[in-house]
Image (tube, helix red, strand yellow):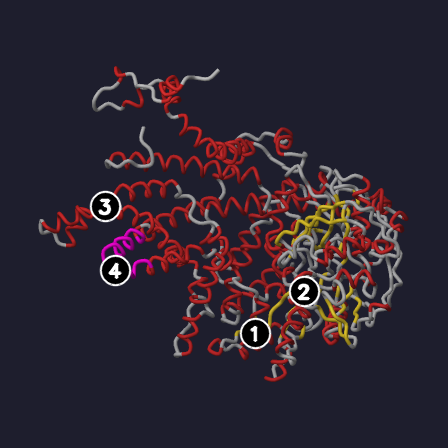
């Protein structure tokens, strides 16, 4: 039995119940769920594959976190489910061990220090670069400049670290040039004290150009009329940037900042692992490499899971906190209730 | 790999530079003696000795296929300096043993996999009578893959496990996921596979896990694999003398070091330092008896002295900066003449020479004899008779197991046989050429013939370098000179699994060693670490080993 065209059209474009609509209200929240499902079904269908991916690869594995409360041995049975059911429960023992673990605290401290440094040194760079490109670089040069800036983003960390070693290492180009001219050589790559600056520097070189894209897009959406109008009103370059360009960037900056804060405890894994020996774990061990070494390299799955859970909870709190602050500052943030 | 022992996870790099050719005939004669029974605890911990062990080990029937040019002595490999034409090669597998199974095999590979269907693998499949689906994984990160694959429900038919990846819970995985090969190989049953029967008994003994013969071994020389190399050609040209004490070594470094002209004296020499100072090997052979009490490697003064000496090379600026940063392959730096001494697996001798002589026919490297730090004869701890094993999945049916054994019997063929020629050099004309007695791999050979079959099982150890006979001679003679100073550590030859509660105990030492020699931490920090180690379980571990010692005796022989 098929619906008549008219019926179908009536179903496809239902009229919202007029009564719930009041000016200045948020109508969406007041519509009944059934109605909204009908209205948005095409959109919902389109998101289903992504939701399925998320479920299978992000949410279902979350259940695996139970091993943090076990003395988990993945090898005692044929598959993970049996192994979990056969491993003994130990309650919060691993969390206790974590609190008493000097290395955990050292990793946490390194993580936070590196995060703060990246936030202050790395984060503003793409914004400044975008402003610079947008304001000063001629369109024809711009494409070339951007391509050059993006390029390092596509290098793997192995390559980046090698390039830095060849440039700034003890036998690198700069040290060797200095020696040839009668100075002492230097070795940036093995100095634990400078490590946090080194990796931030590497990050800027590799990814700052890539980060520019988002800001340039935001700038491109600003209507040229605004600039023209303000120029006609006598605004100089500086005032145009202050009153037009920067406000246009604000929502994007706030959004990225919130996301960045949520990732505070994830400060780079491969990059740091590659340079671990060069400066030692004292300077370079961060939470992610710590989990890797304890869990994957040494087989302490349960303990690593416990550290991972704490890291996840902490990250969630940071996102919620940062989002709240964004709202208080009048920005959209990541989401709005 | 420290000089004398199996190694810890991140030392896997060194095997990377080596095409690990088999090892240890001399030291590997039957090592059996009646000792106590196995030790208690969970089924994967402790060791297996005595009658129980004797009952499961395969019989030993030496191979008479070929006589080496330089016979093995003092635990060295046998040496070969010549290559026979294909027509004169011996045949050790007269009848195809494979029954046509499809075998999935996971093995490490240092290089790029040649891909399924390449002529080398196809020829091997045909010769053995099986069809192998290789699951090659990067050797440098193999342990991480291994842990995940073994935790899954689909374990390949055969899995190679190197000894330095036995950390964490891997021993538990071996006990639970891999088959007992005893019913196929114990006693005289091995005689169905003559090349496996010629594998030295000591190598089999180290392949006994959790009371069962589970591994197919890759036998190794008794002499250390880590070798202190120097640039013999440069030394001769400049008139440098090979040092015989640590003081002389230091002074020589001072003489060589010239960063301005891009020449540093050496790479990281810590592993050699362990031998210079007579430091005990690593787990599980890291104990010695002093007045009836077990003393651990970490507690010995030698250990600290070795670290302190290695540290002095760093602080004087003798160590190449890339070695300090652990970036790149130091062997390449050495070959380029930017560092004149380094230590690496002994197979680097051939590996580096073969490559360098293409451009520089005068390239020569040498290995210095180990010395005691103050001069005189060194204490060199004997290396384990086997340190890489191939296991068969517990789920494999009888035919699959037999086909893995057929493959192992083929790969274990000794040098000078048709089988070994195919395994190590591929097809004549395609992968190698033999002209005027010079056996050389072609470019295709270099790209396709990787040492991945080596890990299934190999014969008693040999070194055959017919293209560079001086290297073969140098390697064997060096091994025989070092072999004269060999000393067996406690528990020698046993495959020992510590209880899982101790698995984390030693995890911090390697990082700390690196920190100390590079000057980031003080030598005194090690003493603090050792006292932590004692209270966190080191003393209990000592008791556990003492009990084991009382049950089993000092060594497997």
Image x and y of residue A297, in percent? 58, 47
Image x and y of residue B261, in percent? 48, 78
Tell whether A113 sits left or right of A133.
right
Residue on which the image places disc 2: B444
Q: Which residues are magenta?
A: A125-143
Asked if residue B481 shows in the view, the reply is no
CA distance for labels 1 and 3: 57 Å
For disc 4, the neighbor class at 10 Å (few under 14, some 14 to 19, many from 20) is few
Q: Specify which label sits upstream in the sequence, 1 or 2.
A: 1
For disc 3, the neighbor class at 10 Å (few under 14, some 14 to 19, many from 20) is some
Residue on which the image places disc 1: B336
Using the image, determine if residue B29 lies above or below residue B396. below
Whether discs 2 and 3 lie on one chain: the answer is no
Whether discs 4 and 1 lie on one chain: the answer is no
Residue on which the image places disc 4: A138
Q: Are marks 2 and 4 in contact (CB under 8 Å)?
A: no
Number of labels in the image equals 4
Residue B148, by quadrant, is top right
Label 3 marks which chain's residue? A
Residue on which the image places disc 3: A222
Using the image, determine if residue B503 lies above or below residue A78. below
Q: Are marks 4 and 3 in contact (CB under 8 Å)?
A: no
Image x and y of residue B131, in percent? 75, 49
């Amino acid at each position: 039995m098929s619906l008549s065209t008219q019926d179908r059209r009536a179903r496809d474009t239902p009229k919202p119940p007029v009564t719930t609509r009041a000016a200045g209200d948020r109508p969406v929240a007041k519509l009944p769920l059934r109605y909204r499902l009908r209205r948005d079904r095409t959109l919902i269908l389109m998101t289903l594959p992504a939701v399925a991916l998320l479920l299978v690869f992000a949410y279902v594995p979350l259940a695996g976190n139970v091993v943090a409360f076990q003395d988990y041995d993945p090898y005692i049975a044929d598959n993970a489910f049996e192994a979990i059911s056969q491993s003994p429960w130990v309650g919060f023992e691993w969390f206790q061990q974590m609190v008493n673990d000097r290395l955990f605290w050292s990793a946490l401290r390194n993580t936070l220090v590196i995060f703060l440094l990246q936030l202050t040194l790395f984060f503003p760079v793409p914004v400044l670069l975008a402003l610079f490109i947008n304001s000063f670089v001629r369109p024809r040069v711009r494409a070339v400049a951007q391509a050059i800036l993006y390029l390092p983003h596509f290098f793997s960390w192995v390559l980046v670290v090698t390039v830095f070693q060849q440039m700034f290492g003890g036998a690198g180009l700069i040290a060797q040039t200095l020696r040839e001219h009668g100075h002492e050589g230097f070795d940036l790559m093995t100095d634990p004290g400078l490590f946090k600056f080194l990796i931030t520097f590497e990050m800027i070189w590799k990814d700052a150009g890539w980060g520019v894209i988002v800001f340039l897009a935001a700038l491109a959406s600003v209507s040229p009329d605004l600039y023209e109008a303000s120029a006609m009103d006598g605004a100089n370059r500086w005032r145009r940037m202050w009153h037009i360009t920067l406000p246009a960037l604000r929502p994007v900056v706030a959004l990225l900042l919130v996301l960045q804060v949520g990732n505070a405890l994830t400060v780079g894994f491969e990059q740091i692992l590659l340079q671990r020996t060069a400066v030692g774990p004292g300077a370079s061990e961060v939470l992610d490499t710590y989990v890797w070494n304890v869990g994957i390299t040494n087989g302490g799955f349960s303990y690593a899971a416990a550290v991972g859970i704490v890291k996840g909870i902490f990250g969630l709190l940071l996102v919620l906190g940062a989002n709240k602050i964004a709202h208080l500052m009048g920005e959209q943030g990541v989401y709005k209730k | 790999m420290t000089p004398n022992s199996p190694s810890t996870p991140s030392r896997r790099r060194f095997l990377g530079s080596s095409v690990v050719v088999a090892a240890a005939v001399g030291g590997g004669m039957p090592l059996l003696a009646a000792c106590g029974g196995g030790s208690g605890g969970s089924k994967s911990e402790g060791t297996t000795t005595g009658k129980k062990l004797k009952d499961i080990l395969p019989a030993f029937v030496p191979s008479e296929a070929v006589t080496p040019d330089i016979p093995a002595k003092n635990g060295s490999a046998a040496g070969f300096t010549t290559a026979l034409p294909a027509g004169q090669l011996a045949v050790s597998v007269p009848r195809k043993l494979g029954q046509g199974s499809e075998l999935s095999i996971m093995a490490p590979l240092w290089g790029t996999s040649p891909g399924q269907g390449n002529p080398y693998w196809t020829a091997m499949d045909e010769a053995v009578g099986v069809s192998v689906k290789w699951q090659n994984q990067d050797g440098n990160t193999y342990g991480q893959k291994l842990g995940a694959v073994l935790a899954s429900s689909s374990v390949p038919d055969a899995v190679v496990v190197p000894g330095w990846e036995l950390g964490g819970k891997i021993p538990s995985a071996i006990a639970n996921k891999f088959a007992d090969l005893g019913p196929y190989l114990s006693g005289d049953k091995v005689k169905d596979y003559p090349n496996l029967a010629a594998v030295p008994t000591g190598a089999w003994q180290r392949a006994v896990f959790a009371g069962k013969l589970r591994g197919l071994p890759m036998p190794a020389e008794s002499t250390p694999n880590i070798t202190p190399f120097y640039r013999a050609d440069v030394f001769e040209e400049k008139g440098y003398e090979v040092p015989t004490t640590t003081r002389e070594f230091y002074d020589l470094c001072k003489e060589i070091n010239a960063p301005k002209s891009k020449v540093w004296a050496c790479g990281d020499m810590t592993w050699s330092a362990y031998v210079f100072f007579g430091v005990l090997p690593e787990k599980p052979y890291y104990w010695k008896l002093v007045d009836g009490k077990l003393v651990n490697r970490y507690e010995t003064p030698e250990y600290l002295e070795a670290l302190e000496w290695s540290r002095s090379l760093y602080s004087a600026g003798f160590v190449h900066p890339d070695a300090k940063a652990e970036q790149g392959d130091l062997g390449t730096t050495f070959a380029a003449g930017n560092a004149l001494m380094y230590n690496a697996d002994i197979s680097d001798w051939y590996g580096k020479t073969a490559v360098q002589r293409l451009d520089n026919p005068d390239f020569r490297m040498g290995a210095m004899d180990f010395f005691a730090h103050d001069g005189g004869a060194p204490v060199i701890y004997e290396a384990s008779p086997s340190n890489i094993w191939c296991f068969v999945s517990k789920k494999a049916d009888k035919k699959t197991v037999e086909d893995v054994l057929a493959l192992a019997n083929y790969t274990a063929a000794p040098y000078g046989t048709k089988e070994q020629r195919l395994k190590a050099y591929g097809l004549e004309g395609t992968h190698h050429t033999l002209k005027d007695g010079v056996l050389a791999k072609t470019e295709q050979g270099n790209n396709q013939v990787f040492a991945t079959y080596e890990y299934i099982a190999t014969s008693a150890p040999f070194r055959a370098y017919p293209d560079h006979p001086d290297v073969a001679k140098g390697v064997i003679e060096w091994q025989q000179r070092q072999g004269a100073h060999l000393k067996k550590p406690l528990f020698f030859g046993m495959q020992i699994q510590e209880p899982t509660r101790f698995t984390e105990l030693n995890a911090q030492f390697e990082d700390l060693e690196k920190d100390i020699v590079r000057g980031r931490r003080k030598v005194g920090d090690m003493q603090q670490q050792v006292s932590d180690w004692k209270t966190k379980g080191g003393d209990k571990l000592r008791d556990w080993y003492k009990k084991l010692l009382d049950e089993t005796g000092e060594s497997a022989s």
